Every structure is written in C-alpha cells, then in structure tokens.
Image (spheres, helix red, strand yellow):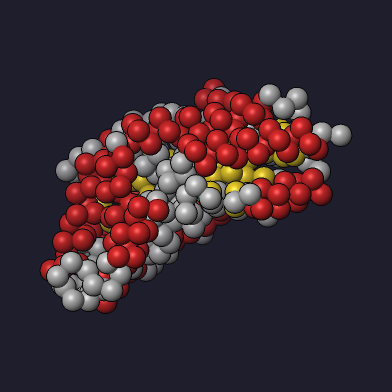
Amino acid sequence: MEGKITYFSPGPAKIPDEVLLHLQKELVCHKNSHVSVMELSHRSKDFTDILDGLERVVRELLNVPANYKILLMQGGGTGQFAAVPLNLMSRKGKADYIVTGSWSSKATKEASKYGTVNLVLPKMDRFTHIPDKSVWKLDPEASYVYYCANETVEGVEFQDIPEVPEGVPLVCDMSSNYFSRPFDVTKFGLIYGGAQKNIGSSGVTLVIIREDLLGSPLPVCPTILDYTITAKNGSLYNTPPTYAIHVMGEVLKWVKKEGGLEEMEKRSIKKSNLIYSIIDESDGFYSNPVESKSRSRMNVVFRVGGAKGKEDLEKKFVDSAAAEGLLSLKGHRSVGGIRASLYNAITVEGVTRLRSFMERFCKENRA
Ligand code: PMP
C-alpha cells in the first residue's frame, strides 16, 4: 500500500505494511496451534509465549530495569486518567498536574474526582508553548507529578523530561510519542500509553510502573484499573485484549528490526523537519502556532491561508491531498486546520510526497 497511499491519521494510525502482511498470513493459524491468535485461550502456552515475547521486547527497547513492572491494561488513555489517581493519590491525597493541552486537561479533570489537584502552570488561553521552569509551582509533598509528553491535538511536545522534587514520582502519558525516541525509564514512577498510535491497534494500554508504587490503591479503585492486582496476576486477572497484545508485540519486533528507538528518533526528526520547514518557508501561507522548541515531531498541526486559516482552502487542501493518496489530514475537530501525524510507521517517502504536495498547493492557491 505504501507507495500509493500515506495514512496520516492521529490514531488509530498506520501499522507498518510488513506487520499487517505478516498478521494476514497467520490470521487463521498461529504457528502450530491450529487456531487463530484471536481464538487462543489467554492461559494457553501459545499465548503465554506471546506475552513473554512482548515483555522481552519492551524491556529491551526501553532498557527497563528489573524493579519496574510491565502491565497490559484496558480502557485506553482515558482509563489511565482515572487509574493514575485511583492508584497513586492515596500517598498524600494531592497531586501536581502540568497542563499543556487537551489531553492533560482531561486527565486533570478526572483526577480531581479522587483528590486535590494542583495546577503547576499558569492557566493558558491557547496551548502553543511550554512555560519556562521559572513559573512552575511544584509541591514537594505531592503524591506525584503528572504530564503528557506529547499533546496530540495541539502538537506540543516536551523535548526533555521535566525535573521534579526529589522523592515525588513522575507520571507520564506517552500515548502519542511512545517508542519514538530513547528515554530514561528510571526518571519515571509510571509511564503509560494506548497502543493505537505508535505501537499497534486500539484496545490495549502499556503501563510501566516502579514496583514501590504498587500496593496502595484507593479503596474505591475498581479491580480492572488496579495496578497491584494487574501486576500480581501478570496482566491476566481477567481476559486481556489478546489480539491487540499480539499486534503490539509484532509492531515492537518491527521497531527493533528497523534499528530501535535511535532509528525511530532519527526518522522522526527528518520527517517532522520536512513539514515544518515548508511551513516556515511558505511566507505565511502555512502557519504553525507552536513555539519552535516545543513543536511535536509526531503531530504537525498547521493552518492554510494565514494564521487563522481559511476553512474553504483547508477543505480543498484535505480533499486534494486525499485525491493524491495523502489521507486523513484534517485537524482535530476542537481546533480545526490540518494535522499530519508522523508516527513510526509513516515513511520518509510518504512525508516527502506530502511536502511536494504542500509546495504545489501553495504555488497554485496563493492568491
Ligand atoms: N492521551 C493522549 C496523548 C491521546 O492522544 C489520547 C487519544 N488520542 C488519549 C490520551 C486518550 O486515549 P484513549 O482514546 O485511548 O482513551
């Protein structure tokens, strides 16, 4: 498919063709099991092998130390907005939230049901930058500090891991930039991300948690969101999303084969620069509102026809791009404009085609 079609969806998003073709080939019969992965018992030897293989590749790619547990959960990122406070808020009854966009806002709202939430940053009208550390208000007595590494809607990404007071666990939503660059797991108490952007299909969420944070959920924490129970049962307390877990394992094996996170990062820098540079060279025809040091490598958002965008021109952009096989470029409904999501499975060639289209579209439509 790649070569004719490039699929810039924000999620569920592109899965590498090579992985899809492998999944197709073994859809009906997995190895010597005589049945499909979808039909395997979650307690069978074949499925245990799939789970073990997934854990191995996660540990290897991210260099996860032995004192961290790897959990596979359901409920997506939204489930984690609740799971994080339900499991960690009991430590001190209050938590620090760094709000840099729509998803961290939603997480904050959910957490405030379960404890006191302190906003670390001054309130912003628009999410176009990450305020300087000098204005952050971090509480050394917080249960944890929460942030979202990449805001998928606004295209705002942290380039560094925030520094937090000693002893306060750092919690991160990596749903939209998981496995797109190397990072130091030991800086975190907990990391989570839904699979449907960089690491597979929807239905499974990968949680990495430091062991000492287990064991103190709030009494109201539902069993299905309880990290301690999930860890104790090797993510098999109830029936897990078996097929989505299998897909994640295959996608991560592909990431490893392609050269791991260093290679994913190299490609991401190249791909995002291809689009940001054409935006910046367009003399205002295209515009991106995000401060340059916080621009996302994963979700490039921009307007067509000036800073506020011309809706008819943006519709023409999306439709003309689709006619050339450049699909799913419409921005999030809450902000409008255009969004090109450049996750790991998007090739440099596909992004180069988008760049050429943008050059041509600008020439032909600059009034
Ligand atoms: N966090 C981020 C950064 C996201 O992009 C999304 C979904 N796009 C979510 C959380 C919510 O995830 P879900 O739809 O899996 O609940």
Q: Residue furthest right?
A: 367
Position of 169 compared to 119: left or right? left
Residue at image position (34%, 55%) is 19
Q: Position of residue 26 (x, y in %)?
A: 27, 67
The quarter holding residue 359 reads top right
Residue at image position (67%, 25%) is 280
Residue at image position (29%, 36%) is 259
Which part of the image, by quadrant, shows the C terminus?
A: top right
Position of 276 compared to 311: left or right? left
Residue 84 versus residue 301 in the image, above or below: below
Q: Position of residue 20 (x, y in %)?
A: 37, 58
Frontmost residue, 307 versus 314: 314
Residue 130 versus residue 234 in the image, above or below: above
Frontmost residue, 68 versus 121: 68
Frontmost residue, 309 versus 128: 309
User: Does the image show residue 73?
Assistant: no
Q: Position of residue 46 (x, y in %)?
A: 16, 67
User: Does the image show residue 19?
Assistant: yes
Q: Position of residue 101 (x, y in %)?
A: 59, 43
